Image (cartoon, rainbow, N blue to C red):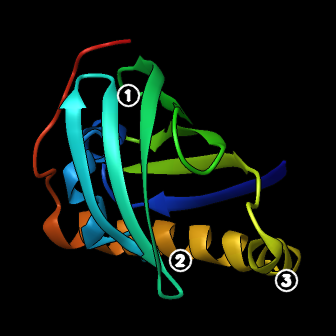
Amino acid sequence: MSHIEESVEVDVPVSTAYNQWTQFEDFPHFMDGVERVDQLTPTSTHWVTKIAGAEREFDAEITQQLRDERIAWTSVSGPKQAGVVTFHRLDEQRSKVMLQLEYAPENFTEAVGDKMGFVGRKAKGDLERFKKFIEDRAVETGAWRGEV
């Protein structure tokens, strides 16, 4: 398993950053290679990705969700991965979003990309695009305030 840790500071309150991250179907707006995310149940999502011309579909299960603090998940089909995103209050109008991801490359090409730091750079870019997305809007597109 490979391990990635990236973070970004955003100029929105922690609740705004958290609320936006609960809107999984909006992920294609800021996650490179994510074509579609369908939220099937409060804890189940179906992903369609296209990276370097290879399309993949997989399901993921949210294993923990604590309001304004963290969302953890694991894949239940497709590429093996698990992760957690945590939200940290810096002050009333600023927060830090931290992503930790573990994944297992499935083939030689993915293993080479992993060794070259492709996934870490992709994660950092996704967080930077999330920052722009939420700061440009200044408000979330929706929210799910339940806990798992």
Horizontally, is 143 left or right of 146 in the view?
left
For mark 1, what is the residue? Answer: 68
The residue positioned 21% from the left and 46% from the top of the image is: 38
Residue 38 is marked as none
Q: Earlier in the sequence, mark 2 or mark 1?
A: 1
Residue 125 is marked as 2
Residue 88: x %, y % from top left? 52, 38
For mark 3, what is the residue? Answer: 116
The residue positioned 35% from the left and 52% from the top of the image is: 47
Judging from the image, what secondary structure is the residue with disc 2 in? helix
Determine contact: label 2, label 1, CB under 8 Å: no
Query: Disc 1 marks which amino acid?
Result: Asp
* C-alpha separation, residue under disc 2 versus residue under disc 1: 22 Å
The residue positioned 48% from the left and 70% from the top of the image is: 126
Give whichever of 12, 100 is nearer the camera.
Answer: 100
Residue 74: x %, y % from top left? 56, 33
Determine contact: label 1, label 3, CB under 8 Å: no
Q: Nearer the viewer, mark 1 or mark 3?
A: 3
Q: Quadrant of residue 122?
A: bottom right
Horizontally, is 51 left or right of 12 in the view?
right
Query: Disc 3 marks which amino acid?
Result: Met
